[in-house]
């Protein structure tokens, strides 16, 4: 889609005034789509209010407590995954997960506010290149990870399926659990609200669980979406570092120098005809 957009835009610019009608049509069509998005944004709070009202009226006020526990369990699971599982993985590569998180603190702050890791895609790729990872590795792993390495998605969808199954008194077989593991997060996207679509597809693959159970967790989707996006982003960055270590596509010394300094510093790789980094200590202020 991106390649086609670049080719189409390049060809359109070469036509000059002859392509004015096409350009005006695209501009007006984009205005229509933005107006549709405005409708959705304005009506979304009413939809969430209706979901909360339905859940409370159907299952009682106690159901809100269970939803709160689901959020707590999910946040706890994400915290343990990042600072235990990913921390061990980074330690095996001689890096620290805490220093990586500190290095990416500005991008993580944006993700916390938007609940979407797409908002910082370009900044993350630039930051990883600045810490010494080759651009070829970054350009391959990060975009691929945005669809196939969504750790937060996998954790959330698995918990959501189990929560809906318990809420509807639906027993899950071993086959159902395997289907959940195989289906969840693959081909998903890290935009807000996309988890509901993937969860609907997951529930459709398990006929025993009613798809209507989606209404049960809809009220808390935004809250879990914040931790989901942050976990996805950190997981993709860790995966990029690990792949770079495997392929020897990272300057370890440069990465450690970047981690040990403020995020306002970036690593400058050595010139092709030089044996040492171009700026002496390998880093300089932006």
Image: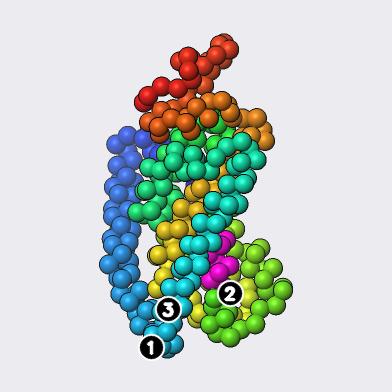
* Closer to the eye: label 1 or 3: 3
Dot 3 alpha-carbon crowd within 10 angstroms: few under 14, some 14 to 19, many 20 or more: few
Residue span colored magenta: 151-161
Disc number placed over residue 65 in the picture, else none: 3
Q: Main secondary structure of the magenta part?
A: helix
**Circle 1 SS class:** helix
The first of marks 1 and 3 along the sequence is 1
Residue plotted at (44% across, 82% down): 63
The first of marks 3 and 2 along the sequence is 3
Provide the residue designation for mark 2.
Answer: 162
Render colour scheme: rainbow
Residue plotted at (54% across, 61% down): 77
Answer above or below: position of 178 versus 242.
Answer: below
**Circle 3 SS class:** helix
Judge by depth and name the residue closer to the eye, 138 or 97: 97
Residue 45 falls inside the magenta stretch: no
Answer above or below: position of 122 versus 281.
Answer: below
Locate residue 16, reporting x and y percent. 32, 34
Q: CA distance from mark 1 to mark 3?
A: 14 Å
**Circle 2 SS class:** helix
Question: Residue 206, located in which quarter of the rendered image?
Answer: bottom right
Q: CA distance from mark 2 to mark 1?
A: 22 Å
Residue 153 falls inside the magenta stretch: yes
Question: Residue 181, located in which quarter of the rendered image?
Answer: bottom right
Disc number placed over residue 57 in the picture, else none: 1
Q: Could you tell me if the residues under marks 3 and 2 are in contact, i.e. CB atoms within 8 Å?
A: no
Dot 1 alpha-carbon crowd within 10 angstroms: few under 14, some 14 to 19, many 20 or more: few
Judge by depth and name the residue closer to the eye, 145 or 31: 145
Q: CA distance from mark 3 to mark 2?
A: 17 Å
Q: Could you tell me if the residues under marks 1 and 3 are in contact, i.e. CB atoms within 8 Å?
A: no
Residue plotted at (54% across, 36% down): 138
Judge by depth and name the residue closer to the eye, 269 or 145: 269
């Amino acid at each position: 889609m991106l390649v086609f957009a670049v080719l189409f835009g390049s060809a359109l610019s070469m036509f000059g005034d002859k392509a004015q009608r096409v350009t005006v049509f695209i501009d007006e069509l984009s205005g229509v789509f933005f107006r549709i998005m405005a409708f959705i944004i304005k009506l979304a709070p009413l939809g969430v209010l209706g979901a909360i009202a339905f859940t409370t009226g159907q299952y009682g006020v106690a159901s809100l407590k269970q939803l709160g526990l689901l959020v707590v369990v999910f946040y706890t699971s994400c915290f343990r995954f990042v600072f235990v599982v990913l921390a061990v993985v980074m330690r095996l590569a001689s890096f620290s997960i805490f220093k990586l998180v500190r290095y990416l603190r500005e991008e993580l702050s944006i993700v916390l506010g938007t609940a979407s890791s797409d908002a910082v895609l370009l900044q993350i790729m630039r930051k990883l290149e600045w810490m010494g990872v080759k651009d070829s590795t970054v350009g391959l792993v990060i975009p691929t990870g945005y669809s196939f390495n969504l750790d937060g998605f996998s954790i959330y969808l698995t918990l959501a399926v189990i929560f809906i199954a318990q809420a509807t008194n639906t027993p899950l077989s071993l086959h159902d659990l395997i289907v959940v593991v195989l289906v969840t997060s693959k081909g998903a996207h890290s935009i807000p609200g996309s988890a509901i679509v993937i969860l609907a597809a997951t529930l459709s693959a398990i006929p025993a669980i009613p798809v209507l159970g989606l209404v049960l967790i809809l009220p808390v989707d935004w809250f879990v979406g914040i931790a989901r996006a942050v976990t996805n982003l950190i997981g993709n960055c860790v995966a990029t570092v690990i792949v770079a270590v495997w392929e020897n596509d990272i300057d370890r010394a440069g990465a450690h120098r970047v981690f040990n300094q403020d995020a306002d510093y970036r690593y400058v790789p050595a010139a092709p005809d030089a044996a040492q980094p171009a700026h002496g200590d390998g880093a300089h202020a932006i």
